Amino acid sequence: MIELLTDPQAWASLLTLTVLEIVLGIDNVVFLSVATGHLPAAEAKRARQLGLLLALGFRIVLLFFISWIVGLKDPIVSVQGFDLSIKDIILILGGGFLIYKAVGHIHEEIEEEPGVEYKAAVKTAFSAVVGQIIVIDIVFSLDSIITAVGLAQHVPIMIAAVIIAVGVMYVASGPVSAFIERHPTTKVLALAFLMLIGVALVADGLGFHIPRGYIYSAMAFAAGVEALNVMAKAKREKARRGH
């Protein structure tokens, strides 16, 4: 353990893995922001905190079962010519769940009548949101840890990278959620991101890997365009107030 502190390769692994975990954590932050969007501010904050705490817990627990995690990649069943492992099945189910939730929320955004607020049944809504967060945390944690196992050999390095990444996610989740709430058009964009991530997870489960670089590049470009729209809208509103 002590020798890791003086090993340049260990520090390089920590830096690389931390950056990758933060990038993969974007999915988690977007889902948390969307899933808690209909809750009152205090409940939403508590749900995000609980979600990130669970994400950290799931990741650390999984790291102590690395040999079991690696074994999840072994095929256990063949369906229509596809050899599926437990990992593949989890990714397919998790991706399908993300697609289902994203499509459902987009439908709500389109069909929602002006002035209608989702304040009813807050108690059941909170428990339902926490349940959804747990399901997605398990899927994202599994994906994250399998990536970590491929990049680092020492569990302490993996744990340190996960803790740092979740810390960054905690700091970012509040501002991201607040931004989405202030700018409703970005919510549809965030839902489209979730749908894209869901499709990528299902594709991974079926053996068709979509490089994450392509997905995140598309997300970054779309987010940049939306940022320009938000700034242009703010400028127009400022000009109208000036008149």
Image (spheres, rainbow, N blue to C red):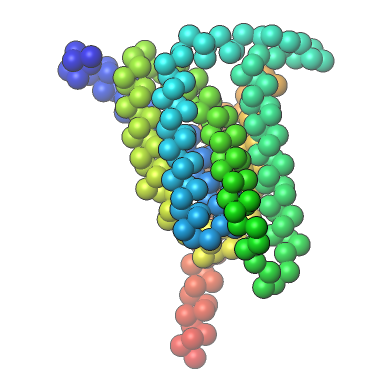
Does residue 6 appear to the left or right of 49 in the view shown?
left
Check the image and name the residue furthest to the right. 80
Task: Note whether residue 220 is visible.
Answer: no
Q: Which quadrant holds the N terminus?
A: top left
Q: Residue at x 43, y 45 (%)?
A: 49
Compared with 65, 54 (above or below) is: below
Q: Residue at x 63, y 51 (%)?
A: 124
Q: Give the total of numbered labels.
A: 0
Residue 117, x across and y down, in percent: 65, 66
Does residue 145 appear to the left or right of 214 in the view shown?
left
Task: Note whether residue 59 is visible.
Answer: yes
Q: Residue at x 41, y 25 (%)?
A: 60
Q: Quadrant of the rendered structure where residue 201 is?
A: top right
Compared with 140, 124 (above or below) is: below
Compared with 192, 238 (above or below) is: below
In this rendered view, identify the residue nearer to me: 59 or 120: 120
Residue 177, x across and y down, in percent: 49, 55
Residue 172, x across and y down, in percent: 41, 48
Residue 164, x across and y down, in percent: 33, 34
Q: Quadrant of the rendered structure where residue 16 is?
A: top left
Does residue 92 appear to the left or right of 61 in the view shown?
right
Q: Residue at x 44, y 22 (%)?
A: 61
Compared with 40, 235 (above or below) is: below
